[in-house]
Image (cartoon, helix red, strand yellow):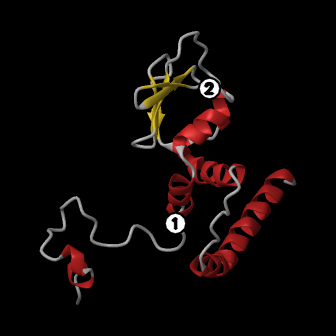
Amino acid sequence: MLRATSVYPDNEGKTPNSSTPTRPERRGVSRLRVIDEAKAKVPVIDLADLLCGPGKMRRTGQRWVAKCPLPDHDERTPSFTVFPATNSWHCFGACQRGGDVVDLAAAAWGYGSGEMAMAAADLLHEFGHEIPPRSASWYAKQKRQKPIRDAIDRARFDHLRRRLFR
């Protein structure tokens, strides 16, 4: 039987408990593709300028500052800072939040933590970039799982019908 370390040569000699994974993250579709695409194509400074409004950001040294554009933060002093060198941002005011361009889009547009891929897709669309297509494995997985999903839906419907019409 082959061990995972022999299949992936870059992990040769690593123990199974090391921090480096010895197998792929998941089968099927990865949401990381659209998130990585958004991080690569959209700079934080452009999104921050769009959210804060044109001419509202001020350059101080190698960073840009403005009032925080997030909806749950109202202050009069500029506490929102963009670091173009690292393509990141941080709010030093009441928010105490920070991150990359996808985190800023999710925070500003009201997406939850499980909706980062949607925020990244919205971000790409907002700046006129193409959203990467889903891979063929995603469609194969959907086709493979369709009978199971249909059976679950049928069982749920039958159960609710029996409870309703006793």
Would you place residue 53 above or below residue 126 in this image?
above
| Number of numbered callouts drawn | 2
Q: Which picture quadrant has residue 18? A: bottom left
Of all residues, the one furthest to the bottom in this rendering is 1
Q: What residue is shown at x 48% (from left), y 17% (from top)? A: 93
Mark 2 against mark 1, which lies toward the viewer? 2
Q: Is residue 105 visible?
A: no
Q: What residue is shown at x 62% (from left), y 34% (from top)? A: 49
Where does residue 158 sit, x and y in percent of width and height?
78, 64
Q: Which picture quadrant has residue 87? A: top left
Asked if residue 25 lies left or right of residue 51, the reply is left
Would you place residue 7 above or below residue 77 in this image?
below
Foreground pick, 97 / 129: 129
Q: Secondary structure at mark 1?
A: loop
User: Do labels 2 and 1 touch, CB within 8 Å?
Assistant: no
Q: Secondary structure at mark 2?
A: loop
Q: What residue is shown at x 66% (from left), y 63% (from top)? A: 131
Q: Which mark is residue 30?
A: 1
- Where is mark 2, residue-wise? 69
Q: Amino acid at mark 2?
A: Pro
